[in-house]
Image (tube, grey):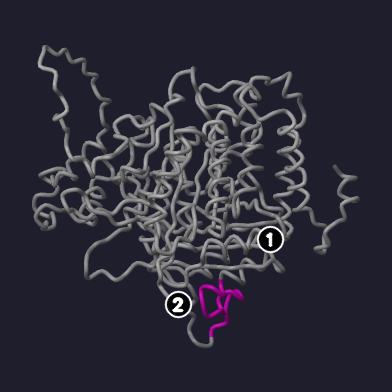
């Protein structure tokens, strides 16, 4: 297969989407290497990164990214970044009289950002740790590997749980000046001027905001040779759902034929919530799901919240993670790890699957909403094989829901794409001695793809299935939080022997991850529950202010009807016979 680079432009719309996106970009940055003797990675970084040049002629490598957020969300990060800083131009100052300057103290940086500043300037973090072991540097430059290595050595020194307020507090990469777009009409902090309702976001994309977005899109699109599409991370529970619906509509109208894969992000909880705010979030999720799905190649909600309703079940739990669901810094890191694997198909160097093909595999017959599942980490014993690991999961699939949509459990599925990433150093097939009877059918297969396919088909025997295996793991360098169980070793595999009592946990530097994207009848139930939740009250009486800036009541009712019809697309009786419209109407 040709290794032609098919570029992808990423859009991050909203504060939680930028949390997830920041972790995701940090993971991509940690995997970069500029060493000439290093063999090319399985993942083609040029798909999402762009090469540029500063005013001084220095080569840069920055994300092909547009990130939108509200005023007050950047703290220490400058909107235009620092890579292309040409210094302050004072030539326009002509006043010769007395001046009185009022200077506001900038927010303090946490320890991680302070150390990052030192590395950017070519410094060494601690003289005792690095003076004798630091790698030689080329004049005026520092390789990405060296930065990663130095940060990794002080991994245990960073505990940012108490110092992360916004996503820029743990951003480790430089951004292009065209990346960050701040919406000054709304505030990040305080109670006034908050972007809380779908209609507020819809109304934003006009005038200067629309012109600014179009300029940024044109800049990134025009430098692409083989643009395959857009990956959109959009907040689902606030006004950014309305903004995202308009953004994806523009992408659909202006770049027809390109893939638009939209991930709707929602945190487990919000600070200072109230019953009215929870109702707003339900309505935003409802309208966002309808409109984002309509304008995208596929739409996949991503959340660790047990459900998107006002009273959801407990947050998603993972057997070998100890994360705090209330911390956005933690929950977004789990979603970013899963998203790193979910986006692998269209980022591969060889045998890459274009966005449109991935979407066509899953979004069949109008079913444009898909659900994600993931095992973070995938439970695999160090030194064992994939058949060994899967044979321990015979009763239930190893992954947990990432879309607040539990699997149906009856094996019915319209389509599935499974990815196993990060098995480096482990065996994909069994290595039994000749003449040994295989303990399970999986142990007799001769490729990792066959092993994983056979295993999944034991649960979903008739569903169309595609699998993809990637050896390279996600590298967890700072500031990724250490939220892993003591049973894991440094590579994220289960240890053969439990660690001695009281011993410190290993610093996990990578993990194996297994993910699944699915379209199936379970989504019909999920969409129907969302429809019922948004239809059981009179919005004009309970939340009249929600409609004050749009949509109109008639448009809201039309969206509910579209959601009901969307849910019907997923209804399927046993045997795969889809019911007639009259039969479905009897149930509604």
- Residue at left offset 71%, top offset 33%: 556
Q: Count residues near mark 2 (Cα–Cα under 10 Å), then give few for <14, some for 14-19, many for 20+.
A: few
Location of residue 526 (image quadrant): top right
Residue 219, image x, y percentages: 38, 50
Seen at 43% across and 45% down, the residue is 21
| Disc on res. 364 | 1
Q: Residues within 10 Å of mark 1 (few under 14, many from 20)?
A: some
Q: Are marks 2 and 1 in contact (CB under 8 Å)?
A: no
Q: Looking at the image, how many numbered discs can be counted on the residues? A: 2
Q: Position of residue 351 (x, y in %)?
A: 47, 72
Q: Which residues are magenta?
A: 436-451
Give coordinates of residue 37: x percent, y percent: 22, 71
Taking the image as shown, residue 545 lies to the left or right of residue 423, namely right
Residue at the image position 53 percent from the left and 41 percent from the top: 265
Q: Which residue is mark 2?
A: 1
Q: Does 304 sit above or below residue 260?
A: above
Separation of marks 2 and 1 at Cα, in angstroms: 26 Å
Q: Secondary structure at mark 1?
A: loop
Question: Which corner quadrant of the image does residue 5 belong to?
Answer: bottom left
Residue 181 covered by magenta stretch: no
In the image, 4 versus 383, the foreground residue is 4
**55 or 562: nearer the eye?**
55
What secondary structure is found at the residue carrying circle 2?
loop
Task: Tell me which label, 2 or 1, sits earlier in the chain.
Answer: 2
* Residue 457 point in image, percent of width and height: 66, 68
């Amino acid at each position: 297969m040709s290794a032609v680079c098919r570029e992808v432009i990423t859009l991050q719309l909203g504060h939680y989407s930028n949390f997830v996106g920041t972790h995701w970009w940090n993971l991509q940055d940690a995997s970069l290497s500029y060493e000439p003797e290093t063999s090319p990675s399985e993942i083609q970084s040029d798909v999402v990164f762009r090469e540029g040049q500063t005013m001084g002629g220095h080569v840069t490598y920055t994300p092909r990214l547009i990130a939108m957020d509200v005023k007050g969300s950047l703290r220490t990060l400058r909107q235009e970044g620092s890579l292309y800083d040409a210094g302050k131009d004072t030539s326009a100052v002509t006043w010769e009289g007395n001046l009185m300057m009022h200077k506001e103290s900038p927010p303090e940086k946490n320890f991680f950002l302070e150390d990052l500043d030192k590395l950017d300037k070519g410094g060494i973090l601690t003289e005792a740790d690095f003076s004798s072991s630091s790698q030689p540097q080329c004049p005026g430059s520092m390789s990405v590997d060296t930065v990663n290595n130095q940060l990794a050595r002080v991994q245990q020194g960073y505990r940012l749980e108490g110092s992360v307020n916004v996503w820029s507090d743990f951003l480790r990469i430089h951004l292009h000046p065209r990346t960050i777009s701040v919406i000054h009409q709304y505030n990040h902090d305080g109670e006034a001027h908050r972007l809380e309702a779908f209609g507020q976001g819809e109304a934003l994309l006009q005038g200067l905001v629309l012109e600014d977005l179009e300029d940024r899109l044109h800049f990134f699109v025009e430098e692409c040779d083989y643009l395959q599409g857009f990956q959109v991370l959009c907040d689902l529970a606030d006004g950014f759902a309305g903004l995202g619906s308009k953004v994806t509509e523009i992408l659909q109208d202006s770049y027809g034929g390109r893939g638009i894969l939209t991930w709707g992000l929602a945190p487990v909880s919000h600070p200072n919530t109230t019953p009215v705010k929870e109702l707003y979030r339900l309505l935003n999720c409802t309208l966002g799901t309808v409109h984002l799905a309509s304008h995208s190649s596929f739409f996949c909600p991503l959340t660790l919240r047990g459900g998107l309703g006002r009273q959801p079940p407990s947050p998603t739990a993972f057997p070998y993670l100890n994360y705090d669901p209330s911390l956005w810094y933690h929950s977004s890191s789990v979603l970013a790890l899963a998203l790193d694997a979910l986006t692998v198909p269209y980022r591969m160097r060889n045998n890459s699957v274009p966005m449109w093909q991935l979407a066509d595999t899953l979004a069949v017959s109008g079913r444009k909403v898909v659900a994600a599942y993931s095992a973070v980490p995938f439970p695999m014993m160090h030194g064992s094989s994939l058949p060994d690991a899967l044979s321990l999961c015979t009763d239930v699939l190893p992954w947990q829901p990432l879309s607040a949509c539990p699997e149906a459990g009856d094996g019915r599925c319209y389509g599935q794409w499974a990815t196993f990433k990060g098995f480096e150093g482990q065996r994909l097939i069994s290595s039994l001695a000749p003449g040994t009877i295989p303990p399970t059918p999986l142990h007799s297969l001769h490729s990792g793809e066959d092993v994983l396919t056979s295993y999944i088909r034991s649960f979903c025997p008739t569903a169309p299935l595609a699998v993809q295996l990637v050896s390279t793991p996600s590298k967890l360098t700072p500031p990724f939080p250490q939220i892993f169980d003591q049973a894991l070793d440094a590579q994220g595999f289960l240890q053969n022997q439990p660690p001695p009592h009281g011993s410190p946990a290993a610093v996990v530097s990578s993990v194996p991850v297994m993910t699944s994207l699915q379209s199936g009848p379970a989504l019909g139930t999920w969409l129907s529950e969302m429809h019922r939740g948004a239809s059981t009250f009179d919005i004009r009486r309970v939340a009249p202010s929600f409609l004050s800036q749009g949509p109109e009541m008639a448009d809201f009712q039309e969206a509910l009807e579209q959601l009901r019809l969307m849910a019907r697309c997923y209804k399927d009786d046993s045997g795969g016979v889809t019911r007639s419209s009259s039969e479905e109407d009897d149930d509604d």
